[in-house]
Image (cartoon, coloured by chain):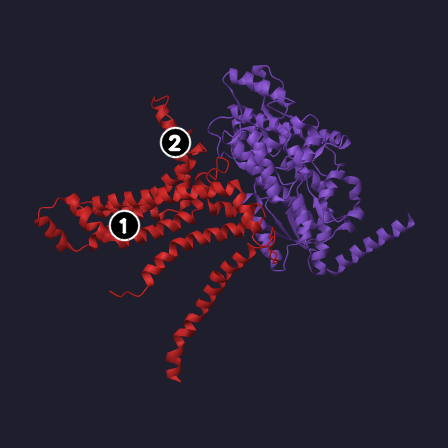
Chain colours: A red, B purple
Amino acid sequence: MTDWLEKHVPKLVLAPSLVAIFVFVYGFIGWTAYVSFTKSRLLPKYDLVGTIQYEKLAASPRWEVALTNLAIFGILFILFATVIGLILAIMLDQKIRTEGPLRTIYLYPMALSFIVTGTAWKWILNPGLGIESVFRDLGFENFSFDWLVNPDLAIYTVVIAGVWQSSGFVMALFLAGLRSVDGEIIRAAMVDGISTPRIYMSIIIPSMAPIFLSSFIVLSHLAIKSFDLVIALTGGGPGYSTDLPATFMYAMAFSRGDIGQAASSATVMMMIVTAIIVPYLYSELRPRHD
Amino acid sequence: MKKMLMVSSALALGLATTAAKAEPQAEVLHWWTSGGEAAAVKVLMEEFNANGGTWTDMPVAGGGGDAAMTALRARVLSGNAPTAVQLKGPSIQEWYEEGALGNIQDVADAENWDELLPEAIQYHLKCDGDYCAAPVNIHRIDWIWANASILEDAGIEPPKSWDEFNAAAEKLQGMGILPLAHGGQAWQDATLFEAVVAGLGGTEFYKKALIDLDMDTLKSDKMVEVFDQMRVLRGYVDDNFSGRDWNLATAMVINGEAAFQIMGDWAKGEFIAAGKEPGKDFYCSSPTGGGYLYNVDSFAFFNVDGDDRQAGQKLLAKLTMGKNFQKVFNLNKGSIPARLDVSMDEFDSCGVQSNKDLGTAIEQNALLPSYAHGMALRGAQAGAVTDVVTAHFNSDMSSQEAVEQLAQAVAASQ
């Protein structure tokens, strides 16, 4: 009896959460994918009609804007957050006295919700309230910084706010990485008279490849599911020029009563995430032979 | 006649017996949660309870009704629909097609709704010929709100057409005054757009373009003109309008920072809350020349089980159309009563004007359901139109290109 218990209790304990995950995560992913092949509008319908929803999606100029924005936002956001995070980490790594407080200051934006970040930056970037009006009041009459209300540039304000929020977090990741580099190698390099920049470029940064990968994965999924930042900062506007796939999906599902379009856009988003995550999982999980 | 009497007395008896058997219950899902609106709904709640019913309030705020609709979908899918839901326009028909709506025809017969409501509005409330929803108000959408002192200083009359509006705006711009306060949100752009469609194109054009979605009309030269006017209007708006809420735009007119705002009659509440008087401190006029863009809010009655809840629906339907509620609710909300026999004595001059124009529009068959506020088209189609309108207004897209995109988007949304 005790043997039986010992053998099966772990399974019994895990079973409910496994069932919950299968139903509420994978089950609903499957459901969404199924619904994306139906003509569902206000309520889900279950007659399969082929790929009509995807064809509609492909023809929609708004979806095109959303995907382009995702590319712009995703690439710039990941790039700048990584570069700024790395620079901050290297500067903090110089054994400075106030490292503790500084680290907290840079990490702190991560504690805010994107709604707070978005609202604060909306005010800062608003031409009538923020930077532009401050500079004009200071006497620079021709100073102009109106990206927030410019349909062509508004997506870059989302990048600014996103980078501000996330680069502190990336910094913390890199700082941990820098500290884990073997001190012996660095000292050996120093003894050989190699300059500090060269040590960073040729020794430390290459040895942090796994950290780059982790931060890329974290940032890219933040970018793809990014929703609240856009809602708070621009509301998708001006027009729909800062729409992202997630806000597109929300508009279709909850404002328009077009579940079919929402499901097909959600499925496309899932495929984008999969395309990024699967190679990562593959490289992490494959048995190592070396 | 005798037969009718018998029917109605039988109905009355039926009502009376159900009432005796079961205490009317109503669970009401709505998003009238702001100050004036909440006070307005409370009137109905009190009347309902005073008539022996029990009202369970289910206010779901957020997203202009999106949150409430999400809650509704969950309730209907789980087979437990609320008794009554704030719904309007084609979404009533959509829910009916999903098989979710009930029938309150017997109340409508007993209370003679067919006589009391404009025909165009009855159309929205009927499901296959029987009433399935009760109206609470008529909002007029195509109002130009104007700051009276700015207009007086500039020597301008409240504009009654787009030509007059453009002339006034040019003059104001020349004097260094911002002509138009506008909030750059998609639904506000759409509100401008439909007023331009109705004003430049007239009622027939509006009906063909935004109700029938007639392709030839959507691609016509007139539609190009409409987008040209939208571009002109863009020039009258300040650069900082993106994402501005409608009430902030109203505040600009109240404070004299801008001369006009084009917005539904809920904007009046902001003026009045600021202690302004219609006709004296601010004016209301319409650019549509006889057209009347309306938004009718209503309670739709869902299929529910149990005598007590069905009795609740009947009582609620009766009270909603009651003279007292129609008056008090609309005094609070800035709109006008949906039933035509309510005295307008206590309403302000804009309300009286709205009621008078409504009468004229009924005679001339010029009552136009508002597309921007979900009265003319279903969600997906209205959304497709709005996408183009807001994309055009917020970029340098040409009118020709906008018309092409409009036709494409509408075709794709069918």
Chain bearing tag 1 is A
Residue under the image location 53 percent in, 59 percent down: A31
> In the shown orientation, is residue A133 left or right of residue A195?
right
Is residue B97 placed above or below A6 in the rendered structure? above
* Mark positioned earlier in the residue sequence (1 or 2): 2
State whether residue A15 is above or below residue B62: below
| Viewer-proximal residue among A119 and A83 | A83
**Crowdedness near tag 1: few (<14), some (14–19) or many (≥20) residues, C-alpha within 10 Å:** many
Residue at the right extreme, as displayed: B2
* Dot 2: chain letter: A
Q: Is residue B249 visible to the viewer in this orientation of the structure?
A: yes
Residue B326: image tag: none
Disc 2 residue crowd, few under 14, some 14–19, many 20+, Cα 10 Å: some
Residue under label 1: A172
- Mark 1 secondary-structure assignment: helix
Q: Nearer the viewer, residue B156 or A191?
A: A191
Give the quadrant of residue B353. Answer: top right
- The residue under label 1 is which amino acid type? Ala
Q: What residue type is labelled 2?
A: Gly
Tag shown at residue A130:
2
Quadrant occupied by the C terminus of chain B:
top right
The percent position of residue B49, horizontal first and vertical second, equals 68, 51
Q: Nearer the viewer, mark 1 or mark 2?
A: 1
Q: Is mark 2 on a helix, strand or loop?
A: loop
Residue shown at the point (41%, 54%) measured from the top left = A275
- Give me the C-alpha separation between circle 1 and circle 2: 30 Å
Residue B46, can we see it?
no
| Left or right for A180, reference B37 | left
Q: Is residue B239 left or right of residue B99?
A: left
Q: Point out residue B8 in the picture as x, y percentages from the top left corner.
A: 84, 51
